[in-house]
Image (spheres, rainbow, N blue to C red):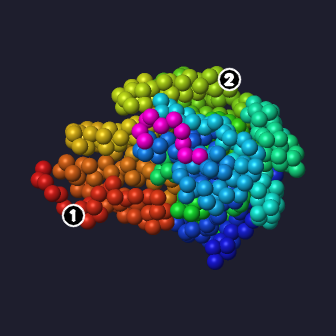
């Protein structure tokens, strides 16, 4: 029945192959469950088990402390695993025979002083798993050959020079798979870079990548109408975040919602090799947020914003929106301004909320409250204040001032999320969780007003609806739903 919700459309110049709704799809409805063709480590990855994808460093430290100098190694191929049981894993067995026959043994060792150390030897694993599909599941291998690769553009990057020098000879010479040409190996690498999804596995303390046949058909939009999560079998579950009309394109977002248009389009060009021309990217106001704009330095009495004349043209002039003002800025100066703001933001102490408050106080008057860099600082600040509340819960009660600051930030950011990622979107859901948790903290302090109590109940009700469509959403941090509907516990 799920397959009736979409159909695969033939390529067009802007979207390539894509999915459209075959009937109206309701908000929260599951559009599909997609089984992966291959899952495994990224090009450079922390040491992980090839059988179950578990991060091996935390496991090793629990088992033997920091003194161990080797991981458990597969008795056949010598690659690290979490234990003997994973030698028989369905994920590892096919590649194990090829790796063992090569005689190559990777030099992957623990780095206790740097548990996030990444090993480049893992770059071969996912390509090998896909190549083995030609024998194990030829219809899947044939499907992968039709995926977009953007190889021509990628060959100009330094990464593909490294892959040509290292991955190609490893596959053809070390593993002895000479039937696959250099072109085939590089094409497959490009297909993986274009179409794989990052999979976060919190219980295994690791991130891996997965190749999904329907996921490869999803087009991008900076204001998506879906989100996805991965179930316990690592199937990709696509959920409608808003109502999707019949015939509408079903799309996801490959970028971050709080980036300005220039930064989003550059990130997509670099990672996915296309120039986005979605509604948000072509709208100078970005759905009314003006996220890329800044205050005109000439308009002091009646501040106006400077926006791009043509947002999809990297060479576009930036011009004040006040028709009586002649101020404009060259694109080179605008990019330099953004680069400086990005450097300032990255230089902040990520453990110090005051550093982010100082950034906001310094830059908000010359930018504006919804400028992309201001929004990024505000969101980072909500995360810091939340972490501080969690860390101090056992020693110091969170102060009402910091809780109310979190609430203020969440309300502001939710107004933005309603415009940029509405409905059940991931970003908006995270903000609702932060807001609900902060309101619950006010309740615990006995200072929750009646309007705030109503807001708390509304937030929790919406989160409970979202959680029914997404099991990764945990509403427990927002307190007891019954408590949010009761009257005050304390007299003011």
Q: Is residue 268 left or right of residue 445?
A: right
- The CA distance from mark 2 to mark 1 is 57 Å
Mark 2 neighbour density, 10 Å: few (under 14) some (14–19) many (20 or more) = few
Where is residue 197 shown, x and y percent of the image? 63, 51
* Quarter occupied by residue 293: top right
Q: Residue at x 45, y 26 (%)?
A: 348
Magenta-colored stretch includes residue 69: yes
Residue located farthest toward the front when viewing the structure as drawn = 75
Where is residue 439 shown, x and y percent of the image? 29, 51
Seen in the picture, residue 441 relative to 342 is either above or below; the reply is below
Q: Residue at x 57, y 40 (%)?
A: 46
Residue located farthest toward the bottom when viewing the structure as drawn = 1
Q: Is residue 80 left or right of residue 170?
A: left
Q: Residues in magenta?
A: 64-73
Where is residue 330 shown, x and y percent of the image? 68, 23
Residue under label 2:
332
Query: Helix, strand, or loop for circle 1?
Result: loop
Q: Nearer the viewer, residue 345 or 39?
A: 39
- Mark closer to the chain start, 2 or 1: 2
Residue under label 1:
486
Query: Helix, strand, or loop for circle 2?
Result: helix
Q: Residue at x 54, y 24 (%)?
A: 343
Mark 1 neighbour density, 10 Å: few (under 14) some (14–19) many (20 or more) = few
Where is residue 139 shown, x and y percent of the image? 80, 65
Asked whether the viewer can see residue 317, the reply is: yes
Asked whether the viewer can see residue 278, the reply is: no
Q: Nearer the viewer, residue 292 or 36?
A: 36
């Amino acid at each position: 029945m799920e397959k009736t919700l979409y159909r695969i459309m033939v390529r067009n110049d802007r979207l390539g192959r894509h999915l459209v709704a075959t009937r109206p799809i309701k908000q929260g409805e599951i559009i599909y469950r997609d089984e992966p063709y291959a899952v495994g480590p990224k090009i450079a990855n922390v040491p992980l088990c090839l059988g179950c994808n578990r991060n091996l460093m935390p496991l090793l430290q629990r088992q033997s402390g920091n003194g161990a100098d080797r991981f458990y190694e597969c008795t056949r191929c010598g690659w690290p695993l979490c234990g003997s049981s994973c030698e028989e894993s369905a994920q590892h067995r096919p590649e194990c025979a090829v790796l063992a026959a090569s005689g190559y043994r990777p030099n992957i060792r623990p780095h206790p002083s740097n548990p996030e150390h990444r090993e480049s030897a893992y770059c071969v694993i996912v390509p090998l798993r896909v190549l083995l599909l030609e024998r194990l599941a030829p219809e899947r291998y044939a499907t992968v050959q039709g995926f977009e690769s953007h190889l021509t553009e990628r060959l100009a990057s330094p990464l593909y020079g490294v892959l040509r020098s290292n991955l190609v000879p490893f596959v053809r010479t070390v593993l002895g798979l000479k039937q696959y040409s250099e072109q085939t190996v590089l094409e497959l690498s490009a297909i993986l870079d274009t179409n794989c999804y990052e999979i976060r596995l919190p219980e295994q303390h690791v991130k891996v990548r997965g190749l999904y046949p329907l996921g490869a058909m999803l087009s991008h939009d900076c204001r998506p109408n879906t989100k996805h999560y991965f179930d316990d079998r690592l199937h990709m579950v696509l959920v409608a975040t808003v109502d999707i009309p019949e015939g509408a394109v079903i799309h996801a977002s490959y970028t971050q919602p709080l980036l300005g248009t220039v930064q989003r389009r550059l990130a997509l060009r670099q990672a996915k090799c296309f120039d986005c021309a979605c509604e948000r990217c072509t709208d100078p106001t970005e759905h009314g947020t003006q996220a890329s704009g800044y205050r005109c330095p000439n308009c002091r009495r009646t501040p106006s914003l400077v926006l791009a004349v043509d947002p999809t043209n990297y060479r576009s002039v930036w011009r004040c929106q006040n028709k009586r003002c002649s101020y404009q800025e060259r694109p080179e100066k605008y990019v330099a301004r953004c680069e400086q703001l990005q450097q300032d933001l990255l230089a902040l102490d990520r453990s110090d909320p005051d550093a982010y408050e100082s950034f906001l106080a310094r830059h908000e008057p010359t930018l504006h409250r919804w400028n992309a860099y201001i929004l990024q600082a505000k969101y980072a600040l909500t995360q810091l204040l939340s972490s501080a509340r969690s860390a101090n819960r056992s020693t110091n009660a969170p102060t009402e001032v910091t809780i109310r600051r979190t609430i203020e930030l969440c309300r502001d950011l939710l107004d933005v999320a309603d415009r940029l990622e509405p409905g059940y979107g991931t970003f908006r859901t995270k903000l609702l969780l932060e807001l609900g948790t902060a309101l619950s903290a006010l309740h615990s302090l006995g200072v929750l007003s009646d309007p705030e109590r109503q807001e708390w109940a509304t937030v929790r009700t919406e989160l409970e609806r979202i959680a029914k469509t997404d099991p990764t959403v945990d509403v427990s941090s927002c307190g007891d739903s019954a408590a949010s509907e009761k009257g005050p516990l304390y007299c003011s």
